[in-house]
Image: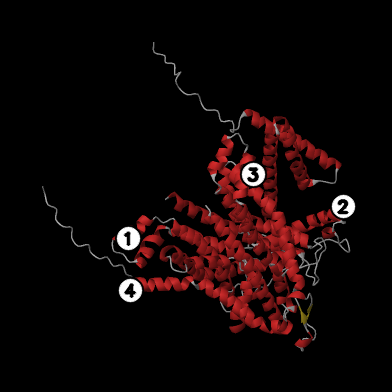
Amino acid sequence: MQTLEAPPEQREIKTYYTKVDKVFRGFVSASALFSLVVLLLIAAFLLYRGFEIFADFGLGFITTSKWDIGNPEDTSTAVLGIGAMLVGSVVTAFVAILVAIPFAIATALFIEYYAPRFLRTLLTAVLDLVAAVPSVIYGIWGYVVLLPLVEDWSATLYKYLNWFPLFDVQTPIFGRSPLLAGLLLAVMILPIVTSVAREVYGQAPRDLVDASYALGGTKWGGIKTVVLPFGRSGLVGGAMLGLGRAMGETVAVYLTLNLVFKVNFQILASSGGNVASLIANKFGEATAYELKALMAAGLVLFLVTLLVNFFATVIVNRSRKII
Amino acid sequence: MTTFQYTDVAPQPRRPWDHSRSTALRVVVLVVLSGAFAWLLNSFTGLSGFLGWYVGLAFAMPLIAFVGSVKHGWNMATDRLATSLVTVAFAAVTIPWVSIVVTVYQKGSKAFHAKYLTDDMRITPSSDLLQYGGVAHAIIGTLLMVLIASLIAVPLGILAAVYIVEIKGRFAKMVRFLTQAMSGVPSIVAGLFIYATVVVSFGGFSAWAGALSLVILMLPTVARTSEEVLKIVPDDLRSASYALGASQARTTFRVVLPTVISGLVTSAVLGIARVVGETAPLILTSSYFVAKTTSLTEPIASLPIYIFSSLGLGDDNATTRAWGGSLVLLGVVFLLFVFARILSSRITRK
């Protein structure tokens, strides 16, 4: 029999950060908070510069639809309000998202489930590339190529569907209308919505899809019962990301929508605008007081898009977490 | 006897979902029939041109696919219907993409002449004949501002990713969330912010201001992509480094970051591709100048503003110049993407 020696006293292990590491961690943490600082600064500075406007007009700045500087010497004669622009942002963004969603679903399904393998990687890359095409190029394309087409389509829609309030106009002259801007925005946000949808559809439980095949189901049967319900919340998140993008788009809307300060729900009429294009439009020749109003408009736009994006991010992240 | 009969070899399994001669035939018949339908539609209604053909096909294909397979039962018919609908919708999505590339190339190449990439618009009005002037000033301005923006945004973005992945600090979730929220900041708001701070306080439009507004838009992309890249570094590498007694700083800078250096470059390139065509913030920050300049404190040209301002004139030659600028810009974005793709394929092969 051999007697075992008692095991040595267990050494106490201390973990601590060296001086270098403390500096390193502090430095990295500080720079990581840069985005927080920027977001806060944006809100603070726009509020600071535009505060006078909110003080002068209060909620009227958001609800009235008029942009009248009045006497440039006397700011009390000015009437400024972005109501029509806010409505225009929402209308164009909704046209865009309503058009984009079905196509995004189809494209995502095509890439994930229908396309041959070699096309799949290629299309994913193309999707990223199209998402990075500058908005000014979309804008010039929309202005030169899409505008005459949409004019034709608008005339046809008006001819046959003018009993429907959305497709009615006072004077049947079509052109740079919310429909055109909305369709262009749909083209622009499609890559974002599609890539979010593609990601969630790709993560749908493959064994359930295979099980539906094994039971004799068709491909569409598997997609309808497994993939689409699984990806629903992710799709909603992606759509909201697209909505935020569409509401904040400047140059493309500037080029494809007539800026008119009147609340307009008739998407064929050539009248509308959005907050972002208002800022780009008025910035060049703005008086000092007008500039303050543009800052205030920027703050409103910032808060609205931040809110939309906040919910979108929460939804997308939650749908990722399920997986 | 030396011949063997391999009777015990299992027969090749049947794969009913594979493409066979009969499916190929089915597709051919479908395309021919829908083509005929589209032709009829084009000759007897107001539809015409490429889009007319597309509408005809898009209408006929799902219909014929459905009707043609109803005899196999409802499930088969809806499956075929769904397949053709998805394909047709996907085809519709590619039409604008192709149209953009083709139009930009066709119209843009008209603006090109021998010295288009080396001349500026110093002595040439935008409406002047197309053999004069060029985009050199805009290219220089864009490069300069994007370079400055990258020098600020890339380190900050990577540090944010390091914070989330390496340090895993208390605010890691919050930092990731804020970066995502920041990616939704409309570009014009970024421009307004820089206008309200830098432009107003430091006396006017400048390349600096333009670059700073691009930083805000570039940072989220860099941070997000770098985070994905850092996550693929195997933990074994970190443990090995710690086991050798290295500090966390040393591990990060000498082990983790060098391992994925090409991925980090990819994230920088993607960030650049995101901002190189930003127009709205530059209208408010760097404005426009017709001559080549590298001064950081004065207004400077950039490709997007060159396009935007040429387009605003309404003159034919100016509009062609806008298309020429678009071609250059699209080419730059495309090259950046190919570059990023090559780099990232190198990292995944490791």
Under mark 1, the amino acid is Ser
Does residue B120 show up? no
Give me the C-alpha separation between circle 4 and circle 3: 58 Å
Query: What chain letter is assigned to the residue under label 1?
Result: B
Q: As drawn, which residue projects farthest toward the bottom?
A: A73
Say if mark 1 contacts mark 4, CB within 8 Å. no
Q: How far apart are marks 3 and 2 (CA)?
A: 34 Å
Q: Which of marks 3 and 2 is in front?
A: 3
- Identified by mark 2, the residue type is Tyr
Report the disc number at residue A160: 2
Q: Distance between the residues labelled 2 and 1?
A: 72 Å
**Residue corresponding to mark 4:** A19
Query: Mark 1 sits on what residue?
Result: B241
Q: What element carries label 3?
A: helix
Position of residue B72 measured from the top left corner of the image (x, y, whole percent): 69, 30
Measured from the top left, where is residue B338 in percent x and y? Answer: 54, 54
Q: Mark 4 falls on what kind of element?
A: helix
For the residues marked 4 and 2, what is the alpha-carbon distance in whole angstroms? 76 Å
Q: In this view, does B63 lie above or below A28?
A: above
Q: Which residue in the structure is indicated by mark 3?
A: A224
SS type, badge 2: helix
User: Residue B204 placed where, x, y %?
Assistant: 62, 81
